[in-house]
Amino acid sequence: MGKIERSDQKRTREGSHSNISRRNFISSCSTCAAYAACMTLAPHTFVKSSFNSSGERKKMRIRILYSLHAVVQPKPDWPNKGFDFGPVMERFNKALTSHFKDMEFIPTLATGPEETEKIVEQDKLEIVDGYIVFQMNCWNKVVQTAIKTGKPVLYADFQFGGSGGFLVYNSSFLNGSDHNIGFVSSSKTEDILAAVNCFEIVRRGGSNADFVTAVTKARLKHTPPAGKFRLLENDIKVLSSDECIKYLSGSKILAVKDQEYKAVDPVMGIPLEYIPFSEVNNAWSAADKDEANIIAERWQKTAQEVIDVPFETLLTSAAMYLGMKYVLKQHGANAITINCLGGFYGGHIHAYPCLGFHELCNEGLVGGCECDVRSTATMLAFSTMTNGRPGFISDPVIDTSKRQIIYAHCVASNKVFGPEGKANPFKIMTHSEDRNGASVRSILPVNYLTTTLKIDNDRKEIIFHQAVAIDNDPDDRACRTKLCAEPLGDIEKLFTMWEKWGWHRVTFYGDLKEPVYALADAIGWKVINET
């Protein structure tokens, strides 16, 4: 088998920070001469240019809908607060207008359904033939309204910007009854252009179904074939299913969602207890300052780099780690998951738990992000099974141009083989979405097989896929740690699973296929292979 080919070239960030307004961007964009006019939605703005003197149609007219909060992002979200989408949109507009001389593109911003409904109503007067929807931020609902027009729609992910909404929304379309939407999920502009070219089929009288089929064929044509990999040895000792079930019944997850105490039913046989922000914050406040200083100094010395994070922030993060560990001990628990952003922005906690989660996972305990109980239970169950190997909870991105899934998050262990295993380099950086606090970019090892999982206690199911770790992406957009991997199996099937299962997945180093299926059989659950 051949060796893995790795790229060491760092991709530059697409777009730089700027304080220009939406109005200034529109007027300054050299490729958007019609941009300001289309934003006013004046009747028949473009109709005259679309017909010749005999009244015959000259150009196919495509509305570009950029689904995002604002030209310069005003709040924390992917890619990050302050991100300037202007250069990105300008690049897309230039590529489209220069490549397709026989199409007329109408670029427009839309934040959600209400704006989009006004736009598509205007398009009934302006005779728009189809839509390109770029998902620039994650959860803005724009594409749904475009689909309802019955016109052909091309749905494109702006990767590390809109990927969560793209995967979840697109999955619902793939599993639904909408037959007028094709999609492209690629970091290469050439792949987007190949998909846009499929609108020509509609111009020549083809149906929406013909358009979607053509987009699919273009995507498959530009997806590389499966690679051949020489994997490094990754011996892993696992507990038997009976042993694992026994340990899990004696474990406990603490979930910190709001200010309430609440006892609930177990998850996968693991006891679960909700505790309030105040308990964690009080433990943080009472943490030993000298001990926090020692931990902060260790982080500073062992990190490959500390970037834009002052030592005072390391101290508050170390105190949060000590506070969480104290709370775990008080409740006899070995896993904690916190509504971190809600707690921090709401003033309920005063330090991000990211570095604390990193430290807990390195020790064989579990720190899970965003009060995601399903992912935290997944982390705990399979860390227990593997004698302490940590799970990497992530927001995945799929890039068909490289046949890759990229697991991205701001929390990651740097001891993926367990507490006694070899450590990998890591950097301490700000939390990506708001450029505050402290989080981790873990430079995860490559040339290993990984197993990615998530449980659903209500359905009694475990979703599963495997991939080969092949690179770490340093892109400044979105979450700090980005492990690039090639999925084994059908990457197209992977697009269908996100509506039902949500965005998060949990990745472990090692081949866990047999023990996962054995555990599922032992507890009467079903394993769903998503590739």
Image (cartoon, rainbow, N blue to C red):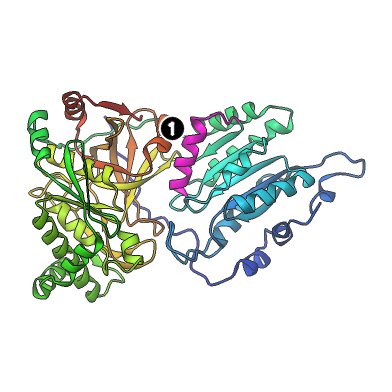
| Residue 386 visible in image | no
Asked if the magenta segment contains residue 169, the reply would be: yes
| Residue 280 visible in image | yes
Q: Which residue is mark 1?
A: 496
Q: Residue at x 48, y 44 (%)?
A: 166
> Range of the magenta residues?
162-179
Left or right of 444 in this view: 25 = right
- Depth check: give the residue in front, 49 or 81: 81
Q: Secondary structure at mark 1?
A: loop
Q: Which residue is situated farthest in the right direction here?
A: 54
Name the image quarter holding residue 446: top left
Q: Residue at x 68, y 27 (%)?
A: 207
The image shows residue 30 at horizontal and vertical percentages of 67, 62
The image shows residue 429 at horizontal and vertical percentages of 29, 65
Residue 311 vertical position relative to residue 405 in the rendered view, above or below: below
- Depth check: give the residue in front, 264 or 79: 264
Q: Residue at x 17, y 25 (%)?
A: 518
